[in-house]
Image: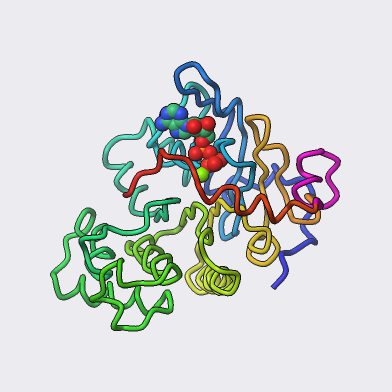
Amino acid sequence: MQPSDTEDSTARQAPDQDVVIRAKGVTVAFDGRTVLEELDLDVRRGEILGFVGASGTGKSVLLRTILGLNRKQAGTIEIFGIDYENAHDEERLAVEQRWGVLFQHGALFSSLTVLENIQVPMREYLDLSPRLMRDLARLKIELVGLQPDAADKYPSELSGGMIKRAALARALALDPDIVFLDEPTSGLDPIGAAEFDELIRTLRETLGLTVYMVTHDLDSLYQACDRIAVLGRKKVLIEGPLQMMLDSDDPWVRSYFHGKRARAIVTDDTAGAPYEESH
Ligand SMILES: Nc1ncnc2c1ncn2[C@@H]1O[C@H](COP(=O)(O)OP(=O)(O)O)[C@@H](O)[C@H]1O
Ligand SMILES: [Mg+2]
């Protein structure tokens, strides 16, 4: 499936009710070193947004800031219309149950089976009987295309692609409205990556999800994403459908989407940054 290229180019002017995340003027610095500066970004309901940028530019930092795991020095982030960072506990809990996250390096807890991993968020947020949790977890396993016998396996017994699927099942544990995926196809072979992209699109259709996907995978951008946001010079340089990227005059955007080395960049980032949580 190709992303829609019929969308108008006024990417930043979606009506409010269609916006699930609105970041405005977001600045994040560590020890005086600014990583993000007055960044603006809108994520729209029901879209698959691909978030790209060179390695080390702050893609994971922005994701963690949206999730309230990094402090920002300036700006506001609203998710479902709520300022999560400054919300009351009850509101925060409600928001946390509406998102699911697949961290860049945080696949699964190695000491827990797949089934137990998927139950972690259920135990944290819901009060369900063991039996119901087991049934729900099995459903998630099926949803992401794993065989039923994956339930009792440990992460070390799974292939890379199966681990990503199991981690996705955990991200879907609470039936979220939005899932955040940080480099979900890195480390997968091209076929595994294409299958994962297909799964994401299918889940978006069937569950009505909004998907925020950090990726270095150009194939994912072409095949899975409806809109793309490019991070560069500490901001979102450009935000819109693929065609807008292809038509852009910005040198970095041009070299990324047209350059011969585009695919070399893909492998660059798989080393990742050492700050991810194994959450
Ligand atoms: N907790 C932290 N403390 C200090 N520096 C950090 C922290 N998290 C990220 N950084 C730095 O912020 C920059 C962006 O990192 P990151 O968001 O992981 O990049 P990427 O775009 O590859 O995901 C990097 O230079 C990284 O070293
Ligand atoms: Mg990253």
Q: Residue at x 41, y 54 (%)?
A: 101
Residue 63 lies, in percent from the top left, at 48, 42
Q: Which of the 4 image quarters holds residue 143?
A: bottom left
| Left or right: residue 88 compared with residue 207 | left
In magenta segment, residue 247: yes
Residue 98 lies, in percent from the top left, at 38, 54
Q: Residue at x 68, y 58 (%)?
A: 218
| Residue 116 in sight | yes
Q: Residue at x 74, y 64 (%)?
A: 4
Q: Relative to 65, does residue 27 appear above or below in the rendering?
A: above
| Left or right: residue 70 compared with residue 40 | left
| Left or right: residue 53 compared with residue 85 | right
Most extreme residue toward the top is 32
Say which of 118 and 127 sits in front: 118
In magenta segment, residue 126: no
Residue 199 lies, in percent from the top left, at 52, 73
Q: How is the image coloured?
A: rainbow
| Residue 22 in sight | no
Q: Magenta: predominant secondary structure element?
A: helix
Q: Which of the 4 image quarters holds residue 27?
A: top right
Q: Relative to 2, does residue 76 appear above or below in the rendering?
A: above
* Quadrant position of the N terminus in the picture: bottom right
Say which of 108 and 118 sits in front: 108
Residue 50 lies, in percent from the top left, at 62, 53
Q: Which of the 4 image quarters holds residue 58?
A: top right
Circle count: 0
Q: Which residues are magenta?
A: 246-259
